[in-house]
Image: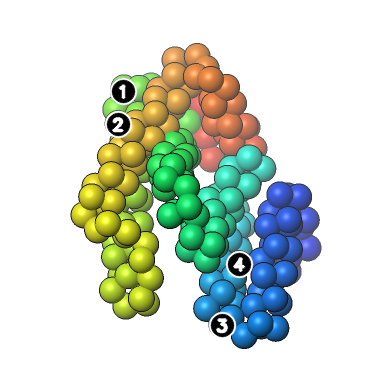
Amino acid sequence: MARFLSRRPPVAVLVIWISLALAFTAALIEGRWSLAFVATATFVLTLLPMVLIHWAGIRMPVSFTVGIVLFIYATIFLGEAFDFYNRYWWWDIALHGGSALGFGMLGFLFIFMLFEGDRYAAPAWALALIACTVAVTIGVLWEIFEFLMDSYAGTNMQKSGLPDTMGDLIVDLAGGAFGGLVGYFYLLDRDLGGLSGGIRQFIADNARLFRRRR
């Protein structure tokens, strides 16, 4: 843990943490306890993935780390504390689509890691399909989290209820499928809009986990 704390986070992550600290301080001064709670919860949630990644001994590309932290910040802090979901109709779609794309790519990397980087261990389409299902599963878990928060914490994360949930899952499926497609093109030694570079970087940084890579 000490080694993790001694490492300098990406600049974008530091900026997010500073904004959360400022919001927390202002909330205490103004007596806005709900905002103080959301700022604290957001900080903890942005810190948790980084701690878990370090604990697992995985080196995460900066773009992946920033993407995860930015998603949590945009979802919990901007979305709930500043009501971005109601201010901007496209906010929820952009977050779910972008996160599903990222989770699809991470799902592909996880499955590919289980095969130790052997691209011939299974058909490329099968790995892409599994990656998509990983992204959709994470989306389902997030919808369960929203339901529990609305039921027991008094939030309004589901907005219109069933239509919101189903719309989110449809976007999750589309984003997850695209993320799986990025992995599919990687296995064919082709790029898809520059996104395969993130997969290559992750594999290069964690070569010990992909010993059978050819």
- Residue 155 lies, with reference to residue 103, above or below; the image says below
Q: Which residue is mark 1?
A: 125
Amino acid at dot 1: Trp
Label 4 or label 2, whichever lies nearer to me, is 4
Residue 18 visible in the displayed image: yes
The answer to which of marks 1 and 4 sits earlier in the sequence is 4
The answer to which of marks 3 and 2 sits earlier in the sequence is 3
The answer to which of marks 4 and 2 sits earlier in the sequence is 4
Q: Position of residue 167 (x, y in %)?
A: 28, 44
Residue 44 visible in the displayed image: no
Q: Is residue 167 left or right of residue 29?
A: left
Q: Which residue is mark 4?
A: 43
Q: Which residue is mark 2?
A: 129
Q: Is residue 201 left or right of residue 154?
A: right
Task: Kindly indicate the quadrant of the structure image that contains residue 142.
Answer: bottom left
Residue at left 59%, top 53%?
69
Tell me the distance, in whole angstroms, between the alpha carbons under discs 1 and 2.
6 Å
Q: Along the line of sight, which residue is nearer the eye, 79 or 47?
A: 79
Label 1 or label 4, whichever lies nearer to me, is 4
Q: Along the line of sight, which residue is nearer the eye, 135 or 85?
A: 85
Q: Position of residue 159 (x, y in %)?
A: 32, 59
Q: Along the line of sight, which residue is nearer the eye, 191 or 175?
A: 175
Q: Are marks 3 and 2 in contact (CB under 8 Å)?
A: no
Q: Are marks 1 and 2 in contact (CB under 8 Å)?
A: yes
Residue at left 44%, top 42%?
90
Q: Which residue is mark 3?
A: 33
- Residue 10 lies, with reference to residue 126, above or below; the image says below
